Structure formats: C-alpha cells, structure tokens
Amino acid sequence: MRERLEELRGEGLAAVEVASTEDDLREVEVGLLGRKGGITAALKALGKLPPEERPLIGQLANEVKVAIQGAIDVKRSTLGQAALSAELSGEGFDATLPGPALPGGGQHPIQAITRELEDLFLSMGFRIADGPEVELEENNFDALNIPTDHPARESHDTIWITPESQRQGDGRGVVLRTHTSPVQVRALREYGAPLRVVAPGRVFRQEALDATHEHTFHQMEGLVVDKGVGVGHMLHAMNTLIEGVMGRKLETRLRPGFFPFVEPGFELDARCPFCQDGCSVCKGSRWIELMPGGLVHPHVLESAGVDSSEYSGYAFGLGLSRIVMLRYGIDDIRWFMSGSLDFLRQFPA
Amino acid sequence: MLISLNWLSDYVDLSDFSAEQVGELLSLHTAEVEGIEEVGAAIADVVIGEVLECDKHPDADKLSVTRVAYGSNEEVNVVCGAPNVRAGLKVAFAPVGSKLPGNLKIKKAKLRGVVSCGMICSERELEMSDEHGGILELPEDAPVGMPLVEYLDLQDFVIELDNKSLTHRPDLWGHYGFARELAAILGRELRPMELAEVAQEVAPSEPDGRFTIRIEDANSCRFYAGLEVSLDGAGGPSPKWMQRRLRAVGQRPIDLLVDLTNYLLLETGQPTHVFDRTKVRGDLIRVRRAEEGERLKTLDDQERELTNEDLLIADAEGGVALAGVMGGANSEVGDGTSTILLEAAHFAPTRVRRTAHRLSLRTEASSRFEKTLDPVGTWQAVERFVALLRQLRPEARVLGPARVAGSSAPDAVQLELDAVRTVELLGLPLSTDEVSSILRRLGFTVVAKGDQLTVDVPSWRSSKDVRKPIDLVEEVGRLAGYHRIDAQPLVAPIEAIPADPMRSLTRRLGQRLMGAHQAFESQGYTFLQRDWATWLDQRRESFVLVDNPVQDGVDLVRQDWVPSLLDQAAGNWRAVPTGSLFEIGKGYTPQGPGLPAQQRWLCVVLWQRIEDEHHGPGSSFGRARAVAEDLLRVAGVRWAAVPAAAEQLPGGGHPAQSLTYGNGAMLVSTVHPRVRAALDLTDAKLTVVRVDLEALLEAQGRSVSFQPPSKFPAIKCDIALALPANLSFAEIEVALRKAGGKSLVELELFDVYEEGSLAAQGQRSIAFHATLQAGDRTLTDKDEQRFLKKISEVAERLGGSLRS
C-alpha cells in the first residue's frame, strides 16, 4: 500500500510536470484526486488495513494528496499566467483590420443648419413659424409694403401661378413666394404682438442657374415685435445667430440697406472668417455681407393689425443657402438641389 | 453706378480723404460700394520722353529708328512706325519692363534687325481715345521723365456703387447727389452747381408761331420743358476734360452734344434729350401714347413696334422719341445740326420701366426715370445744360424762353418726428439737437418744439423715399452711423414656447430614416417637367401650373415629393446601384381660386438592381414595408397594412405591389414600370414610401404604457410550412396567430422559398421563428407539441403541411 501511494505520488507529480494545458491538469486532478481517482480509492481502502497501519498510511495518503494538489495549483497558476501573457501579447491580432461596413444615412446640410438654428432660437424664446411656399401676392408683396408697380413683382423676377392675363394687381394673385418675409405677415396675424418668431423655408426667384444663383433656395426669417424694440436688439439677435452658425464670434457691423418692408433697413457684415487680409470670399474687403434686416415698417405692422404707435419690431432674413455654403465651404449652390449622393454622403446624420 | 472722385471734388472738399476712405464713408452711411478703381493705373508706367534723333529704318519704309531720352541719363533706341514721329518731339513713352492697358508688357525686341527698347504710344494704346493715326504729341515744355498721368492730370479714382442699393434713392443717380451726401456726412459745405438763368413760359396747347408742347397723357408725364438753342455751327468734339471724366465713369465720348447730355445726366441724375430742331416736323411736340403697332426707329437703328402702353414724343407726323427711353433716329443730332431742341421732362416711372423692359432697352435714361426723379431737378437740368454749353461754346444762343407744360412743383411733404422715440428705436445716444442737426445737414428744414420736430422734406427726397416719420429715423440713424449701435439683448418675460408636435414628429422620423435606415435626406425641386403628368397617368389640370416657368416645359408644381426623388434616384443610379433618399416637405394640388391645397409629406425612395432582388422579407418591397412600419412604430401609430385599392393608388404606384395604411394616409408601393421606363431605369427596382404627415400626427397614440415581462421562461421554436403559393402571407399569419392563441407571443417570418419541387406543386415554403410564453406558468414540451400539432392542422386545412 505504501509502495502504491509512493508510486501514485511519482506518477502524479510527473504528470503535473508534463501537463501543458488546463485540460491536461484537469485530467490529472480527476484521475488521482477525483471521486474515482487513485488516491481517493486508496483513502477509501484504508478501512481494509490493519488498525495499526491505518494512521501511518492515512497520513501518507494525505501527504501525497496535498503534494499533488499543491503541484497542480502551482502548475495551474503558471499556465494561467502564461495564457494571460499570450493573450495580452497581441500575437495574431491585427487591430488595424477594418470592421464590416455599417453605412449610415445623412442629413441635408441646409436642414442640418436649419435645425441647429431652430434650436438656438427656441432657446431664446422664439416660436418657429411656417407659411406656404405657394403664397398670395398680397402676403408676398402688398402687406410687405412692396407697391403694385414694383419691378420685383414682374415675371422676370417672380415665379407666378396666376397667368399674366389674369393678374389684377389686387393682391389676389398667386405666386411662389420670393422670400420668407410673408411669414412675418402670417405670424403677426395669427399670434399678434408681442411676438418672437423665426421661419425657415424655401423661396423662389426667376434666376438662371449658375454656381452662385438658384431659382430655389432657402432663407430664414426672424421677427420680433414688442414694446420698445430697437436696432440694438436686432443686432444682438444677428450676432447670436452668426455665432451659432459659424461656431464662433465674428466682429460685425451694420450699414444701410434698402428693403421696402423695413425702415430703416440694414445689411449686416461680418469679418471674413477665412482670412486676415483679404481673400476671394470677401473679395479683399475683409467683410462679408451676411444678412439683411431692419425695423419692421409701420405699414407691415398695421396691415397685420398691430398698432405701430405702441409696438415696434425688427426683422431679418438670413440667406440659409449662402451661409451653409460658407460654413461647409461648398463651392456651388447647385449641389443643394441635386440629390447627388456624392454631395449628400459628406454630411452624416 | 460709377462715381469719379475728381468730379465729386467739384462740389465738396475731399482733399484730406483717400478714395478708400470715401468708399468706406459711403458704405457705412449711404449705399453699398462694390469696388474702387484707380483711373490711369493701367498707364502708370508711361513717362514723358523726348525723341532726340530720328532716322529711316534701313530695311523698312514705314519704320523709323529713334533715340529717346526719358529720364535722368536714360537714352534708348526705339523703332517706331508712326508717321508723325520726328526729332525734338515730346512723346508718351513706355520703357522696357512697363505695362500698357490690356496687360501688354513692353519687352526688348528686334524689329527687322534693329533692336528696340520701349514703345512710343498713341492715344488708343493709352486708352485715352480711339485716336491711332499717329503717336500722341505732347507740348514742347513737357518735362522729360515725368509720369504721363501726373502731367496730364489723369489721376482719378472711381467708386463703383451697387445699383440695387440705390433703387430707393432717386437723388443718388448723379454725382451731385453723392456730393450732397458726403457733405452731409462730413458736415462740410456743398458747393452749388453753376446754373444759367433761363426764362420759361407756359406752352400754349397749339402752336403760336413758335414751337410748343402738349402733354396728352398727364399721368405719364408730369412736366415737360423744351428749349431751342442755336449752335451757330458749333459742333465737333467735347473738351478733353469732359472726355476724361466721361471715360473715367465708363462713357465713350461721341461729340459735343451727346457728351454734354451724358455729362449732365451723370452729374445731375436728370436725363435730357436733344433733337435736331430742323428734323422735328412742325411746331407742336405732343407727349402721347403710341398707337397700337406704331413704329419708331430708335437711335440704335432698331425699328421698334410700339403698343398703346408706350409713351411717345411725337411731332406733326409721328414719333421722334420713345419717352424716357431713347430718342428717334429721325431727329438725331449730327455734324450738320445748327439748332437743337432740348427736352427735359418728368416721365412716370412705371410707364418708362414697362416700355424699357418690353423692348429689352434699358438705358441710362430709363433706369433713372424708373426711380421717380425730383421734378425740381428737371427744370434745373435745363439751367445746367445752358451753363455748361456756354462754357464749351460761348457762341451758342438760347432762342427765347423755354416752353414748359405741366408742373415742376415738388411733392410738399411735412412730417412730425418724435426725437425721443427716434433715438430709442435706433439705440443710439443722440440728443434732440443732434437729431435736428443731422436732418438739417441733409437739407431738411426742421422746427423743434421740445422733442417734437416738424420736418419739411426737400424736393430731391420727397419724390419717393421720404414720406413717413420712420423714413426720417433712417436718415438720422445712417448719418449718425449704424456701426455705432451697440448690440443689446432683448428683455422679455420668460414663457414656455407652445409645443410643436409636427416639428417633433418630423424630426424623429427623419432621425430614424437617417440613422436606422441609412437613408439620405434630400431637397428636390418644386417644379416638374410636364411629362410627369403623362408618366404618372394624371391630367395636367390635376397639378398647380406655373405661368412663367424657370425652364421651358418645367411647369408642374409637385403634389408630393415622389417624382423629384425618383428624378434624383435616376441621377444617382449608375454610380450608386443601391440607395435611398427621403424628403420632408409640402406638396400642392389645385382647389379653385386662391391658394392651392397644401399637404405635408414624408416621402422615401429606395432603389436597387433588379438582379440583386431577393424574395421574401429581404426584397425591396419588404424593405420599404419594414421602413414604413418602423416609422409607424416611431410615430406611435397602429395602422394595419391593407392592399391598396385602385382609387388610393397614386399614378406612379404599382397596382399589384402596393399597401396602404390608415385609409391611404401611408402608402408603400413598387414604382410603376411606365415611370421606370420614362426615367430609363428599366433594370432598377424602385419602391416608395409616402406618408401624409398631418394624418399621421392626427393618429399619434398616447404615450407608451409599460407591461411587466413574464417571470416564466419562453420556448423558441422554428416552424416551416409548405403552403399553396397563391395564399397571401397575411391570410397565413392570421390563421397561425389564431391557432397559437395567447401564448404565441412572437411570430417572425425568416424565409420564403418559392423554387424547387414545391414550386412545381404550386406551393411555397414559409418559415418562422415562433416564441411561446405564458404569464402564469412555465411552458413545457407538451405545450410545444400541442402548438405544433395545431399549426400542422392549420397548414393542412389551408392545403399544405408542416415541414418541420
């Protein structure tokens, strides 16, 4: 019995020694120390020995068991370390291999900026208003103080639904709106004063297509009417808007501009964001013209039923298409309406 | 509009300002400056030279070999072809390395074997005139080496203003208006224009031995002055100084009379016209409408056919000028003209504009009359004309008093202005005195009573642009300087913005399409080419039609966004064989007079190659359907799919491959083969999803209500059925769900197989993942067996079998 135990010890330790995997170790462990293993069997057979031998053999069997278990634990730890180091070594792994293609869709850049600006103005307590693209002559012109004989109304500037022979000059004709400004009139009529509102949307003009001219383009109208509103408030909103679109503050200046529905009217220039001393975008002037605006003409307030002796307001009209071109460096306005995936793919959602 | 700095300086002292500074002043206070150009910059390198020697070229008859001195100790050999070159002559010389107009660079050259170092210039080469018969001869005392520009006092700067920023300012269409503006901005003196005193008398309506004027359409002509002037044979060119100014602002000098009227127009902004008096037949000038079809040959030698909408200046026999637009060829002045009839008139802006536009004949005159000119300026032009003529041709004689018809009285405009409110609106810290002083500088008359100002508007501003108190606010603001206004945040009560459910719905749907469905948001034209009506099998009248389309034949307004998306899909198709575009926006349909009906749509187009087409859930149609139903899920709307009835299907839809949801509010359809063929997309499979967003918003359910998950485990099993091929999936699904009862919590199609031996028997294989689960107990194998048995029975009842 003693010899058998010594034999098992020798075999066991040797087997542990040569084991190179966890599976090998497990096999040794089960073969010797498991329920049906050799040492377990030896311990079970103790009862058959003469009582005087039992303590000694029992002690020996225990010693063998402990020795083998100890060797297994040591080996297991060694193997574990080796396996961990092997895994951490990175051998056979190329992290630079690409994964599978996960194509995503995209957001139209004009819509992307529109949504950004909507959120910006919502945060300042503006509503977002909307008006039809096919609009009444009255809203597009008359209510905006654009007189009946103003050249802008003629077919070479405006796209008309009403046939020329049926245009009466009574405001009831139908046009494709030439600006987002009719939303000023609609919003004032619907909500009255005081009012803060922006209205993004598409507008239409008779233009021959080229890199900088489109007959279909996008604007965003802003309108604030309240007691005591002045030019300084308009300038503040414009500055905030430009910072929002361009991602940083730009120096700005107001200078005179003429639009029949505002008085006084302005053009807002911003410091060219692309140069320090003149470039092709600012044509060397270091200023770029970004946004017309002005104080809402009393005629516009009155035709929407707002008392112009009590209320004043400002309005601005951002050329969305142009500012999106500036923001992304888009060189040709025709990309916007092209639907070309070569273009759209560059603007991930 | 081009403005010469030298010309401005006749009337306001700008000597301490550079051209850039003047431009900046105008930009900040008046109108948009487009650019500034230095006149003479192109010949800045040209200097005065002296021809020291001049010999015949040994090998060329017409060439001379000269020795030219042009500075301190600089002497070179120059070959010259001019007949008037000779020794001792002072000339304009361009040395080697200098530049001439047209970017011509002077290099050392060999002409017939003789080296030539520079060029002696003609007036045309210097762009001083069209003279090219010989070289420019300078006076004997011209100092050698001095830049030519300096010697001839050619230096000037021209400021270009954006015409569009001047449309509301009739007073700014001549130099004097800008001088007045700058004088006001700088607070400097405005020097008066030199005027001649000219007597006037009311023109009788019939001739009385002298010529007379009759205005027959008073609405189109407010005032007409005519003046006869005898030139006493004095024709010929205008003086050099006048030619220089005209050239500087882009006008080609012609002759004395033409140059004089052009000069007058560019100085005062008032167009005038001169007739050859002897060519005007009879003694009566009629200002009348043209007859329908009446013809007039204009000064540009074009025969014009007129309408009753055109205003004509006519003599006894017919038209002699198209009022406010262009003179007639029949009364044109020329070398032989001895007596002229000067016209200065005030024509109605709209009439002039319409005629000019209809005839595509926009002239310097018509573009000014369009602006509603100052009637006082009309008469002043006569006085300025005579003053200038006397300066150029002292022998010219005015024949009798001018005859005038109509009235040159200005619109009297008096306005009340509240100075305090003015300052509040502008956000500028100005006192009432400062407000008054600014207005006075601009020529307004101001009477102040406390902060209330009574303001009389001068004639040059009252004709059009200053009619209301708010117009004065603008005057005060721009003169004080808008750039001095500080940004100021608006203070207002904090209130929640009312919810905008449509905006939040469209944003969620858009995000979902871009994110989960890899679709690209697009923007397409509102206009469709007229063929789309045919392709969509719709009547042309079912579209809103554009009267003056941007392009011939592109005159339909889209009803929804499917056609434009299909056009864009066609544009992408060759390069991108699988893709998807969507657009959110509005479509229009006619509904009688007034505005057309407007509808908000979300439209998606998906395309792929027919050869890549799968059956079952992976098909294009299946994809489109999955997108549609996912959008319903995102919107929180429970609409069931129903095969589209013919009347719900739009023209481009496929009659057998369409589904609708919510009574037609949402549509999934394969694109009709007719449309595919029209777009040359016969090898593409195209499907569309179209959603009526108003209806979808209407149907939006309440928010999600949470269901606690079952605590008991689920059983998953796959079932494959062989079923008759003509049985629709919808019928099968209903039968299976019924058989599965409450414990069938999920039934997901994963395969449809329509080929092989089954197909030969008129059957197809349909396979599902099924999930069974109960809320109150753990299901066992027995439950699964019972379920499969029921499924098997259903399959047999439907004429098929359970395959596994």
Image (spheres, grey):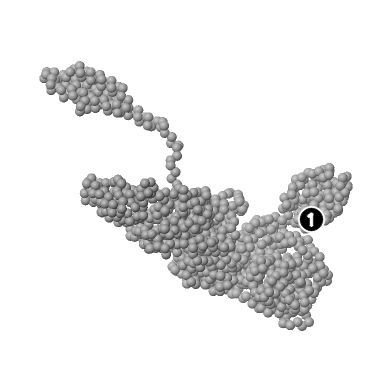
Toward the viewer: B102 or A57?
A57
Q: Is residue B775 visible?
A: yes
Quick check: B417 left or right of B178?
left
- Rate crowding at label 1 as few (under 14), some (14 to 19) or many (20 or more) other CA atoms within 10 Å: some
> Can you identify the residue that label 1 sits on?
B123
Q: Quadrant of the C terminus of chain B?
A: top left
Residue B88 in picture, x, y percent from top left: 87, 51
Residue B779 in picture, x, y percent from top left: 23, 47
Residue drawn at x 81%, y 65% is B236
Q: Is residue A253 visible?
A: no
Q: Quadrant of residue B199?
A: bottom right
Residue drawn at x 46%, y 57% is B671
> Which amino acid type is shown beneath numbered disc 1?
Glu
Q: Quadrant of the N terminus of chain B?
A: bottom right
| Above or below for B101 versus B193 | above
Toward the viewer: A219 or B484?
A219
Residue B514 in picture, x, y percent from top left: 44, 52
| Above or below for B505 versus B436 | above
